[in-house]
């Protein structure tokens, strides 16, 4: 369904593989708040290997002797990685089982504190990544120049392929759902997200094509960095220009739903041109029918603390942090063709973990 995503800084500068082993991808959730120290929710920070969030939540619920709905988490983490994240466990009597009963070779408890409320989705400040690329082929000078461009100018804030399923199949499945195919409730939200993400990526691709993804257009709607607050359109000014250069604000694109786009003039024209075609119309109509309301998402992001090192001539280690909802695969895409070694065996493995 989706066209290959373009790149902001030109042709690929490398080919590589990553995630040969879970340790090649370390993801640490950045906490969005401090525990209150009291209450009936035990807030656990755990580190897990080769285990996705849903499977870990099931294990924690079984350890605590409660229903899975009593376990909360801020975001989903992949199976093919070593990940560190928080879970909340509802224990009304404020008596927790022995933590030793939860620890195993693939899960360990880093910290435990009491908190007053269940951990809601999205309650995180971002994620920190440490990625190891192997079998790297490409000119080191060109690779480091590309990393310098990303650090200085940011990069397009694509929705990653995780949103779309293997070979982009979730978008086709969303179109079938909108046409009347029945799906399970847990699949519905996944397909709605895929449809919305597909439309956003098309708008971002159009903004990349005209060079406005990181500078804005007449009629732009702006988003404050580090939040979802938006403002504008308003007349271009030196103040706006400086805030844009300082990464204090970002141009935005549509997350489709009911209502009229807030963008005006050239910004709205670009959105409308990008979302022509029968499939785009079907996706838009389906999202509106499902009751989603329009929102905005930043068109660009800048990895915080981007650093790299070469442990070996063909091994590149990257570290950086991203805001919530942004994808490390967007950084890898800007570098070049990075294959996922775990996919070579994933078809033979159960996704129950």
Image (cartoon, rainbow, N blue to C red):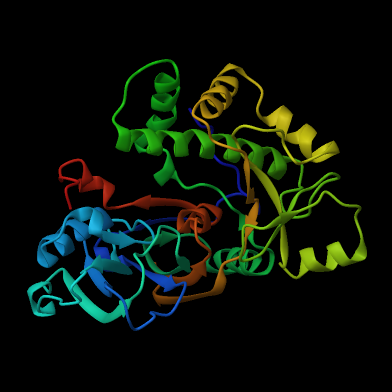
> Which residue appears farthest toward the left when viewing the image?
101
Query: Which residue is at the front of the view, 199 or 229?
Result: 229
- Is 92 situated above or below 34? above
Q: Quadrant of residue 59?
A: bottom left
Q: Is residue 84 visible?
A: no
Q: Quadrant of residue 132?
A: bottom left
- Is 26 situated above or below 114? above
Q: Is residue 97 visible?
A: yes
Q: How far across and down, in percent of the image, does residue 17 sit? A: 36, 56
> Residue at the location (22% across, 46% down)?
346
> Residue at the location (64% across, 55% down)?
300
- 34 left or right, relative to 238: left
Query: Which residue is at the front of the view, 92 or 211?
Result: 92
Q: How far across and down, in percent of the image, does residue 96 sit? A: 15, 76
- Is 12 situated above or below 197? below
- 270 left or right, relative to 234: left
Q: How far across and down, in percent of the image, does residue 293 sit? A: 59, 37
Q: How far across and down, in percent of the image, does residue 93 sit? A: 18, 73
Q: Total label count?
A: 0
Q: Quadrant of residue 30?
A: bottom left
Query: Which residue is at the front of the view, 121 or 162?
Result: 121
> Residue at the location (69% across, 44% down)?
208
- 252 left or right, relative to 216: left
- Is 150 situated above or below 100? above
């Amino acid at each position: 369904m989706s066209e290959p995503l373009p790149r902001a800084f030109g042709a690929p500068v490398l080919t590589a593989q990553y995630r040969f082993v879970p340790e090649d991808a370390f993801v640490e959730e950045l906490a969005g708040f401090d525990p209150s120290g009291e209450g009936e929710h035990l807030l656990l920070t755990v580190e897990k290997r080769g285990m996705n969030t849903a499977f870990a939540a099931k294990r924690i619920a079984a350890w605590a002797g409660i229903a899975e709905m009593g376990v909360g988490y801020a975001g989903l983490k992949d199976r093919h990685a070593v990940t560190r994240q928080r879970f909340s466990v509802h224990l009304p009597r404020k008596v927790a089982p022995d933590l030793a009963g939860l620890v195993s070779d693939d899960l360990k408890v880093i910290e435990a504190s009491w908190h007053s409320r269940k951990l809601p989705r999205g309650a995180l400040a971002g994620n920190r990544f440490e990625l190891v690329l192997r079998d790297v082929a490409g000119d080191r000078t060109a690779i480091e120049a590309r990393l310098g461009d990303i650090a200085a100018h940011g990069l397009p804030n694509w929705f990653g392929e995780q949103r779309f399923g293997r070979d982009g199949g979730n978008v086709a499945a969303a179109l079938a759902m909108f046409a009347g195919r029945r799906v399970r409730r847990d699949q519905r939200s996944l397909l709605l997200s895929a449809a919305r993400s597909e439309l956003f990526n098309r708008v971002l691709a159009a903004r990349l094509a005209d060079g406005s993804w990181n500078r804005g257009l007449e009629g732009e709607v702006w988003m404050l960095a580090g939040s979802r607050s938006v403002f504008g359109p308003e007349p271009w000014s030196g103040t706006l220009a400086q805030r844009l250069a300082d990464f204090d604000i970002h141009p935005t694109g549509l997350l489709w739903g009911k209502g009229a786009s807030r963008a005006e003039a050239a910004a709205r024209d670009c959105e409308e041109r990008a979302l022509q075609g029968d499939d785009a119309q079907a996706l838009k109509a389906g999202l509106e029918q499902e009751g989603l309301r329009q929102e905005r998402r930043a068109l660009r992001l800048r990895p915080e603390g981007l650093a790299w090192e070469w442990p070996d001539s063909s091994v590149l280690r990257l570290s950086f942090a991203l805001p919530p909802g942004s994808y490390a695969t967007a950084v890898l895409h800007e570098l070049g063709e990075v294959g996922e070694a775990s996919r070579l065996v994933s078809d033979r493995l159960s996704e129950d973990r």
